[in-house]
Structure formats: C-alpha cells, structure tokens
Image (cartoon, helix red, strand yellow):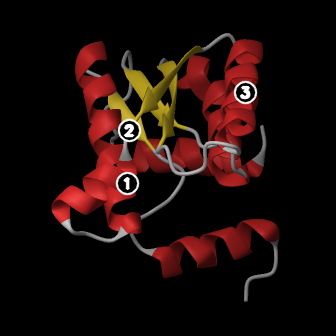
Amino acid sequence: MHPLELTIRRIVAENNLPLTGRDVVVAVSGGPDSMALLHILASLRNLLDIGLHVVCVDHGLRPGETGAEIALVREAARRLGLAFEVVQVDTAAWVRRHRISLEHGARELRYRALHQVADRLERAVICVGHSADDQAEEILIRLIRGSGR
C-alpha cells in the first residue's frame, strides 16, 4: 500500500470519520490534486467500504478548455468503474447577482452543487482535494513531494 494511502486510512481511523457503507461524492476538476484524490479513494474503497460518485462542476467560465478536463475525469471514472456526472453552474451570473468575487462565487456554487448531489444520494459525504487553509495545503503538498520547504 502506498504511504499516502496508509496516511489517509490512519486519518479516517483516528478521526472516527463515518464513512463505512456510505457514498462519497468526490469533487474532481481534472487537476493533479483531485485526480490523485480520486485514484487514492478508488484504491481504498473496498477497505473503507465506501461507494464513490465522481462529480465534475463546470463553472461555465472557460468554455473552450473545460471539455478536455471533463473528458479526462469522465474517462478516469469509467476506467475505475465509478458513477460520474457533470454539474453545470453559471458562475458569472451568480457573481453579478450577488456582487461577490469570482473566486468566492465559484466556491459557493461548487459546494452548493456538491451538496445537492450528496443530498440526492442520501447519507453521502463530500470529499474535495483542497483545504480551507491554503498555507497548510501548500505545506502538505510540499511534504508529499518531498521538498518540505
């Protein structure tokens, strides 16, 4: 088992995370962090006794680029034998209507979409490949990559 898989398994056990027998909605953008998360969770799904449902949120901000990213995620889900869906949101309209930053609006809509999918699946939990604390995330990424600085 890969050391990162062991770490995730330990974190789940130490924090008593209620995953057994539940579906996990995995937010996957196609970037390296979320794709790594997807593959790690897929490798642990039997051990953790979880179902995986892959969700790609299309914010409608990069029409010429997101198609390839969605196709990448769709193919990864297919190869792993996982349910997959794309949720379309209109971030530009949301930002204008609520007079908030693009980043804030995209985050709000992404989490709304993920919660809607989780609610529909019943008893599902959401897993994303980033944290609220960007500095901690950066430190973790550096440790994983071996630089530590």
The residue tagged 3 is: 71
Q: Is residue 138 left or right of residue 132?
A: right
**Could you tell me if residue 143 is visible in this image?**
yes
To which quarter of the image does residue 29 belong? top right
x and y percent of residue 5 in the render?
67, 43
Tell me which label, 3 or 1, sits earlier in the chain: 3
Q: Quadrant of the N terminus?
A: top right
Instruction: Return the x and y of residue 24 as percentages of the image width and height.
Output: 43, 27
Q: Amino acid at mark 2?
A: Val
> Image point 66% across, 32% down: which residue?
70
- Evaluate if marks 1 and 2 touch, with contact meaning CB atoms under 8 Å apart: no
As helix, strand or loop, the secondary structure at mark 3 comes to: helix
Q: CA distance from mark 3 to mark 2?
A: 17 Å
Q: Nearer the viewer, residue 59 or 16?
A: 59
**Relative image position of residue 134 (x, y in whole percent):** 49, 75
Label 3 vs label 2, nearer the camera: 2
Question: Pointer 2: residues within 10 angstroms few (<14), some, or many (20+)?
Answer: some
Label 3 is placed on what type of residue? Ala
Look at the picture and state if 83 lies above or below 56: above
Query: For mark 1, what is the residue?
Result: 92
10 Å crowding of disc 1: few (<14), some (14-19), many (20+): some
Q: Is residue 63 left or right of residue 107?
A: right
> Outermost residue, bottom direction?
149
Kindly identify which numbered label has been placed on residue 89. Answer: 2
Residue type indicated by callout 1: Ala
Residue at the image point whose x is 75% and y is 31% from the top: 72
Of 64 and 117, which appears nearest the observer?
Answer: 64
Quadrant of the image occupied by residue 126:
top left
Quote the CA–CA distance across marks 3 and 1. 23 Å
